[in-house]
Structures are given as structure tokens and as C-alpha cells.
Amino acid sequence: MIRDGLKRHYIGMNKEFRYRGEDAGRLEAISDSVFALAIALLLISTSAPKKFEDIILFTYELLPFAFCISLIILIWHEHVVFFLRYGLRNPKIIFFNAIFFFILLYYVYLL
């Protein structure tokens, strides 16, 4: 998976830092699925062009669309690094993670 490649090659990570969350648990799995759902919601919100004018309009929407997806991927990467660094899986972290997922999906749904 992508997470294994990030860990193996230290992509975006500090080599001097001792990582504690080496194994991906259920919390990380649902996190990955929520981020995938957010990107899928962005993809579903766009409609397929039917005419040439629609293609021109779609090209104007392409830059903000790419910006939104890159922001979601950046947030996902920081989320992965957080759980690799600290390896926290207590009820408080799960609660804050659920709130974070709600806010993420809420904003993506509004787009």
C-alpha cells in the first residue's frame, strides 16, 4: 500500500526520529477510507461534459479541483506521519479523529 512505501523510503519523514506507530491499525484503515471517500465525493461532484462548451468550462474548474485534491492528499500525509510518529490509539484521539473526519467530509460535501 501507499503507507508502506512512505514508511520504507521515509518520504516526508525525519530519519532521525524514532517512529512508534509502525503497524497500521483499524483507526488508520478507516482514516484512509475517509480520505478516499472525500476524494470520491469531489469526483462525483463534477459532471461529464456533453458539449464542447462544457469541456471549456471543465478546464476552468480543473485548477481548483486539482488544488482541492492536493490539499486532501497533503492533510492525509500529515495524518499518516502523525500516527507513525506518536502511535496514539486512545479514546481521546479516536474522538478527535472522528470530529476531524466529520469536518473534512462536511466541507468536501459542500463543494
Image (cartoon, rainbow, N blue to C red):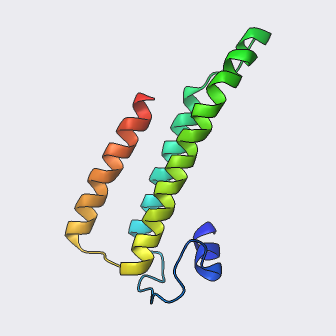
Please determine whether, in this image, residue 70 is positioned above or below residue 50.
below
Where residue 64 sits in the image (x, y, percent)? 57, 32
Residue at the far left in the pictured view? 92
Q: Nearest the camera: 64 or 80?
A: 64
Residue 24 drawn above or below residue 111: below
Extreme residue toward the right, this view: 52
**What is the quadrant of the N terminus in the image?**
bottom right
Q: Give percent across and percent down for residue 72.
A: 50, 49
Left or right position of 8 against 98: right
At a point 53% along the width and 40% down the height, the residue shown is 68
Identify the image quadrant of residue 57.
Answer: top right
Q: Is residue 28 visible?
A: yes
Report whether 19 appears left or right of 97: right
Is the residue 58 above or below the residue 5 in the image? Answer: above
Residue 51 visible, this orientation: no
Q: Quadrant of residue 61?
A: top right
* Left or right, 103 with reference to 83: left
Q: What residue sits 63% from the left and 21% below the top?
A: 47
Q: Position of residue 44 (x, y in %)?
A: 57, 31
Which quadrant, please, contains the C terminus? top left
Question: Percent from the top left, x then y, of residue 13?
Answer: 53, 76
**Point 48% across, 58% down: residue:** 76
State how many labels appear.
Answer: 0
